[in-house]
Amino acid sequence: MAVQVSIPKGTRDFTTSEMSKRNYIFDNIKSIFKKYGYQAIETPAMENLSTLLGKYGDEGDKLIFKILNSGNYLNKIDEGKLNHENTTEITNLISEKGLRYDLTVPFARFIVQNRSEITFPFKRYQIQPVWRADKPQRGRYREFFQCDVDIIGSNSLFNEFELIQIIDEIFEIINLKVTIKINNRKILAGIAETIGESDKFIPITVAIDKIDKIGLEKVNEELQKSGLSDDAINKLQPVLNTKRNTQESIKFLSGMLKTSETGLTGLEEIKTIFDYLQHFQPKANVELDLSLARGLNYYTGAIFEVKSDEVEIGSICGGGRYDDLTSVFGMKDISGVGVSFGADRIYDVLTQLNKFPNETEKSSDVIFINFGKAEELKCIEIATELRKSNYSCEVYPQKAKLDKQFKYANNKNIPFVIIIGEQELENGNVTIKNMLSGEQTTIKNTEVIDYLKKPKL
Amino acid sequence: MAVQVSIPKGTRDFTTSEMSKRNYIFDNIKSIFKKYGYQAIETPAMENLSTLLGKYGDEGDKLIFKILNSGNYLNKIDEGKLNHENTTEITNLISEKGLRYDLTVPFARFIVQNRSEITFPFKRYQIQPVWRADKPQRGRYREFFQCDVDIIGSNSLFNEFELIQIIDEIFEIINLKVTIKINNRKILAGIAETIGESDKFIPITVAIDKIDKIGLEKVNEELQKSGLSDDAINKLQPVLNTKRNTQESIKFLSGMLKTSETGLTGLEEIKTIFDYLQHFQPKANVELDLSLARGLNYYTGAIFEVKSDEVEIGSICGGGRYDDLTSVFGMKDISGVGVSFGADRIYDVLTQLNKFPNETEKSSDVIFINFGKAEELKCIEIATELRKSNYSCEVYPQKAKLDKQFKYANNKNIPFVIIIGEQELENGNVTIKNMLSGEQTTIKNTEVIDYLKKPKL
């Protein structure tokens, strides 16, 4: 009887099949990042709590996994202080480190700490797990991967355009139809200004951000609760409840934002981005969506979100421009723009659409059945040749019943089984079975590579 | 002024240049693992402490990073108990999870937990960070990567042979000269038996394991302290202090182990492995080393260690056969064999020998200098073509001084700079500068790919 073993709730093991599919996603994403000159960095799983705390709001602080100091950590605390009321103080005394909550804050810390070695504009990507002590539920994990790409130290809108190119190429290469929605926080600020509620900019963006989830009516209720006047809410309706294409939205905004300098700047930025796009025909739909707000307050310019055209699910990629990421660590006036790919959701979409290539299920190209020592040596010889020609292959590690070995080949989705029995050995032959078609053929043992090279039906 | 930022001691940021070199190592290792049919798995960073504790000895338990429970963790403890004396008990009450200490125990847990989905023999590799609250020092980190490859559920010696093939190919592909040392714990047990000290098997292996670090004399002192008789220590000397080649060692053992069944079994195993090697000419030296012991007590058969022939450094790869890995989680009689690659040390060896390929320093193949909007659009067009032909390239994101843009190209080790100024734009040309040779040439803008394809001196 096996002992009951388990892993912490909200965490996952990734089996060989899951890893193969996840790597299909990550490898494709990385290949496009690299094509555009972005390079990988990594930061440690643990950061000093002084780096992490206060960056995600009070709720976020509570969700950071804290690491107990080593050694006799309690001895440093006066025993008189050890009681329930002092939990917060005690926590600060017994824990100095935490697990990273996202990649953004560690990245900002990285830039400041390594600034003398960094060439700006700095194009980096980062694919690492993050940890949050959130209540686990379907699709929400306590350990999950973030996949961020950013360019820091250039405020050119060329970068926004390049990110759209990257998003477009990535979803093309993994064969997903998507819509890339774009908006600009300056446009939203301009709208808040023209409806006379500039000081309510944050609650307005927070409310608009929920429109997909809770609907227009509830958004209006929230706006009312935030103290917006009925007049302002009325003026906001044409922004929220009309379907316009990008050109119509631009025309609409040209009218609405006439009196707002910020708004017009945002509109110019949007126009510039769409001008760029005319010189690069994206496969994805790219559209200006005025109801796109992005909740995160550090965005200051363009914002992006990507939706699947084929599956009803939240955004599978999102991001925007920020002008003040590193100032919390004392480095001011560094503008950047970036997006983050939601690997778990992309995985779910590909699974639902059955769009993972068959390749991701395959472990090796070829397996050699093992009939015992003499035949095994011939298998090793041919396997070595195949590997030199870049085929992955296995020799079953011991003599075993044929059906057991074939079951192994089946379970591991190995497309070709090579049989070298006594007779094949004697005649210098091999028998190859195509596991997909069931076809079996005997050829010279010098012709295996030629056989594998031939296209199969 | 930037705020003083830092990361926890013993942890590291990996810059773009370091990541590129690390990935060169990991990508090559993975490519060979895959060629032999091994597949990736991953386990969560956090494990339940019940999984981790008691597996690494008392010292190991202390070095596990423990994670503070979320919420009002102190309230669950009676206030009367909150004092310095109860530290251990309090730790157990306020922390249920820890960061993995190695990949071996989580792997054993993974096998038991996922056994119904696993096809045995199970060939897996795993490359993930581990965390230890060790005192940081040169070459010893609190966060470092392990890179393990194992096959579980087959006791065939073919697997030992295959691992030697894998080790050999990996060090060949990254261009390092190494010696693969092999021994067998059954031989060591046989030796302990024939010198009349079977019950001292563990202290004998622990002492022998240190011979490289502390020398023969100190090993003998340790053996004496462990209670070995002078007679036994005398009998052990021919095992330890004589340089023999593999054939001589086998002959020597045939005599010495005559009376030990276990010892002779080990010897037969070694002979089988070397028989296999005659059918696969390894590039590395492979030798039987009787002083190789491997301190870890879970090894039961073959043991391996790899040393650089070029740089004086500890072992850069090691492992062995174990017969009882999963029994601690209730799953008995599962034999496995595996090795672990020391990425940090391999990195140091490659650095010291200057053997990282130039490719690892390169960010993109090509950068386009940005002279302003009209020229930029032409750059985008050509860059898109180049990317379709798998070149990585960047367009400098804004108009800037030429020397600034060239400095960027230089810092990022980009080999080709493409210049499209007003004149080039007008004539349908581009000027390409080879940053290595300094050579500069003007060609038609349709001929860029042909130019890049040509071999450069």
Image (spheres, coloured by chain):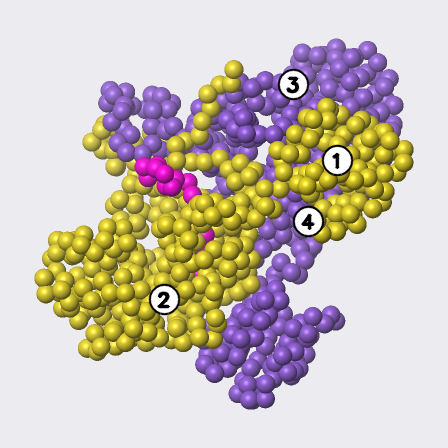
Chain colours: A purple, B yellow
- Choose top left, top right, bottom left or bottom right for residue B325: bottom left
The residue that mark 3 highlights is A202
Label 2, label 4: how far apart the Cα atoms are: 42 Å
Q: Residue furthest left?
A: B230
Quick one: label 1, few (<14), some, or many (20+) residues within 10 Å? many
Q: Are marks 3 and 1 on the same chain?
A: no
- What segment is highlighted magenta in the picture? B133-152
Label 3 secondary element: helix
Foreground residue, B360 or A352?
Answer: B360
- Judging from the image, mark 1 belongs to the subunit labelled B
Q: Are marks 1 and 4 on the same chain?
A: yes
Disc 4 marks which amino acid?
A: Leu
Q: Residue at x 56, y 82 (%)?
A: A420
Residue behind mark 4 = B457
| Classed neighbour count for the residue bearing mark 3: other residues with Cα under 10 Å, few (<14), some (14–19), many (≥20) | some
- Tell me whether the residue at label 4 lies in contact with that at label 3, contact meaning CB atoms closer than 8 angstroms: no
- Residue B445: give its label: none
- Labels 1 and 2: the sequence-earlier one: 2
Q: Which chain letter matches label 4?
A: B
Mark toward the start of the polypeptide (1 vs 4): 1
**Which of the two discs, 2 and 4, sits closer to the camera?**
4
Q: Residues within 10 Å of mark 2 (few under 14, many from 20)?
A: some
What kind of residue is marked 1? Answer: Phe
Give the residue at mark 2: B287
Q: Position of residue B355 (x, y in %)?
A: 51, 49
Q: Label 3 marks which chain's residue?
A: A
Residue at the (62%, 58%) spot, across then down: A360
